[in-house]
Every structure is written in C-alpha cells, then in structure tokens.
Amino acid sequence: MISDSSERFSGWLAALEQRHLANLRPSEVSRALRSLSSYYVERRTRLAQGAALNTAGKRAAFALFYGPLHFLVTREIITAIERARYVAQILDLGCGSGAAGAAWALTSGRCTINGIDKHPWTIDEANWTYRQLGITGYAGQGDIARAPIRGRKGHGILAAYSINELDDEIRSSLLERLAGAKENGSHILVIEPIAKRALTWWPEWTDRFVAAGGRADEWRFRLELPERQRALGRAAGLDPRELTARSLWM
C-alpha cells in the first residue's frame, strides 16, 4: 500500500503542474505565493473572507505549494498516531484543496471521504484531487457551522488548517459537537500551523481533548520537498527545511 500511495502522490504532483501551470509561468505563481504566505503568517483573519483565493495566481500557489505540504504533514501525523490509521470514512471540515483529507484516506487504505468548504473553487479542486488520487468521495459547498457532524464508530473527522478561521462563537459550538462525536465513537483530528502568534483558543481545545483521553502534539518533520515545491518556495523567499504543525487528537 505504501508503494501504491507513493505512486499516486507522484502522479498527483505531475497532474497539479499540468493543471495549474497551463496558463501561468512559475515566476507568476512564486510572486502570488509571496502574497499568499503573508496571509498565513500575518493576516489569517482575512483568509475567511476569501482573500487567499481571489486571483488565479494565488489559487495556483495554494494548490501547487500548500496542497502538497498539507498532504505530507497530515500523512506523517497519521502515521505517527497509529490508531488514526483505522477509519472507514472521513468528514473533512474546511477541506480546502482536499490534500489533507486525501492524505488521511490514502494512509488508511480503503476509506471514503466527504469534504465541506465554503469556497466554490476549493470544492472543484478537492473533487479533482480525490479523482487524481483514486479516492472514493465527494466535496460539497457548505458551512462548518452547519456541517452534519454525526459521531459514528470507525469514522474520522478532520479539521486541518480551518479552525482558526472561524469566529469565536462558531468555534466554541464546534468544540462541543466534536466532543459529542468522539463520545459516539468517531476519531477527531485537528491540525494547525505552529505560528508565531499564539492561537488564543488552542489551550481550551487542548484541555478538552486531553480530558477526553486524547493528546496534543507539536510536530517537526525533516522531509525533502518535491522539486517543484522547493523551487516555488525558494523563489518566494520560503525555504522550509522542516515541516511543522500542531495537532489535537481524540
């Protein structure tokens, strides 16, 4: 399965280049990546307003650079948390381009996925990602606040790089809904970057996850990025020698 997953990942990367560099030069994508990275580091509150995806260049940069990074980070986290591998279905809240959820699905083996996101472009991209990677699933447009979160044994619920973009009231309600889903047998995984600015909500979430028998981790993975992602990152002034993230699991 590992070899098959690696082959699918390589094929997906090649297809990403064909898809997003058909009408853009790599230099244009690198310039957009510089702008996009500032939203993640300095202006994350504007992500929820769609600022990260308001040009073709930023959309290409998101898919070509951050998509593979999110895939690799999620794959490593799932591999490290052994119990996380055994899910039959995944609900991906704020699925983005579908990369993080796809990583969990591939690492788990025979697994279906349902993605939810607000932005119509990400829905199209996530469904394309699932097809490219041979994953059975579907992404639809929707709001996390109204997502059908129903806990069920053997099911996984993923929120990767999406919780911080919610307002406080919705985030608080979501925590209660996720705790209820865990009680009904679901596996819950939250992933966020290790940012310079503190996530004010993270301690409360950590306490709830740990109290429910879960865990909180910070990760540093020394991985060699694929060549295209290395080149885009260098040109944009980004040179990640290691991939980092924080996660909550229960």
Image (tube, rainbow, N blue to C red):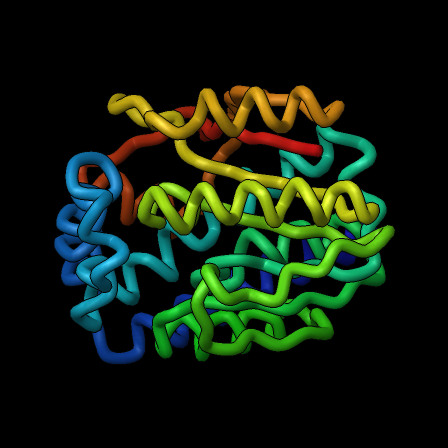
Note whether 50 is above or below 219 in the view shown. below
* Front-lying residue, 241 or 51: 51
Numbered disc total: 0
Which residue lies at the image location 44% right of the left edge and 36% below the top edge?
192
Which residue lies at the image location 82% right of the left edge and 35% below the top edge?
83
* Front-lying residue, 44 or 238: 44
Residue 188 position in % (x across, y down) = 67, 42
Residue 88 position in % (x across, y down) = 83, 58
Residue 157 position in % (x across, y down) = 66, 51
> Looking at the rendering, in which quadrant would you find the C terminus?
top right
**Quadrant in which residue 44 is drawn:** top left
Residue 94 position in % (x across, y down) = 46, 59
Which residue lies at the image location 67% right of the left edge and 62% below the top edge?
8
Can see residue 70? no
Which residue lies at the image location 25% right of the left edge and 53% below the top edge?
47
- Specify whether 112 is left or right of 128: right
- Specify whether 101 is left or right of 86: left
- Specify whether 94 is left or right of 31: right
Can see residue 201? yes
